[in-house]
Amino acid sequence: MITVDAIPYPYQFDSRHTALVVIDMQRDFVEEGGFGSVLGNDVRPLATIVPTVAKLLALAREHGVLVVHTRESHLPDLSDCPPAKLKRGNPTLGIGDEGPMGRILVRGEPGNQILPLLAPHDGELVIDKPGKGAFYATDLHAQLQARGITHLLFAGVTTEVCVQTSMREANDRGYECLIVEDACASYFPVFHQATLAMLTAQGGIVGWKAPLSTLQASFK
Ligand code: C5J
């Protein structure tokens, strides 16, 4: 059993029953010139966490923690995209439109791919999700149950949207969740901080948080 000196109190997990879920580290969200930056977002806070996520992936792989990657993505005919989601957002560039790296949030397009540095390894799960949460309209829960996973470590982007939604969905399904705080980021640093505070308030109402260095130390 590993014990992490986490907030709000120590978090314990068994690597064999734990998965690292890396949310949406896609080129269109993180890279300069992608969808996110074309919409006017400053992508630097997202790009900054890439080395930390790479180290976290290496730690998980070294210790036999299952790795799950997600991508926010839709079928090319957008039949899995609710009209409300299609209408939302920037009127000049929306889901399915031709963007700087191919069609926005469409499976298989260059911008929809995970950053090469964080690319999935053989045997790791890759979940294409049409929603913000990783459990909505995916088989993630079934895949985790089939592998006896009870604990989830979260990383990725953005902290307050897809990471937070996924962690809340996981918590409601009975998983013990920890967010690796410096392996997540938002275009809005204040939202990042607020999300970490919300998730861990009231004695860990959604779960725990710890930085990568604390997680690394817990394996020693
Ligand atoms: C994610 C978004 N991945 N912000 N998507 O957080 O729309």
Image (spheres, rainbow, N blue to C red):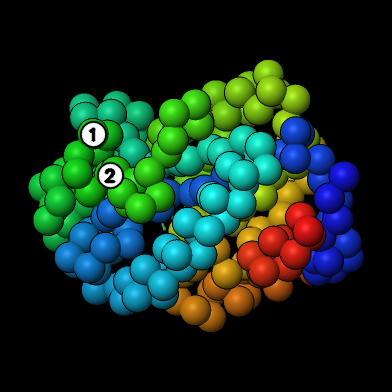
Amino acid type at image mark 2: Asn
Secondary structure found at label 2: helix
Outermost residue toward the top in this view: 146
Determine contact: label 2, label 1, CB under 8 Å.
yes
> Does the image show residue 123?
yes
Residue at 55% across, 24% down: 139
Tell me which image quadrant ligand 1 sits in.
bottom left
Q: Quadrant of residue 29?
A: bottom left
Q: In the figure, 216 relative to 19: above or below?
A: below
Q: Position of residue 77 (x, y in %)?
A: 21, 27
Q: CA distance from mark 2 to mark 1?
A: 6 Å
Secondary structure found at label 1: loop
Amino acid type at image mark 1: Gly
The numbered disc on residue 112 is 2
Q: Nearer the viewer, residue 145 or 60?
A: 60
Q: Position of residue 196 (x, y in %)?
A: 66, 69
Quarter the C terminus occupies = bottom right
The numbered disc on residue 207 is none
Query: Is 29 situated left or right of 34 in this image?
Result: right
Determine which residue is flagged by label 1: 108
> Does the image show residue 137?
no
Q: Quadrant of residue 173?
A: top right
Q: Residues within 10 Å of mark 1 (few under 14, many from 20)?
A: some
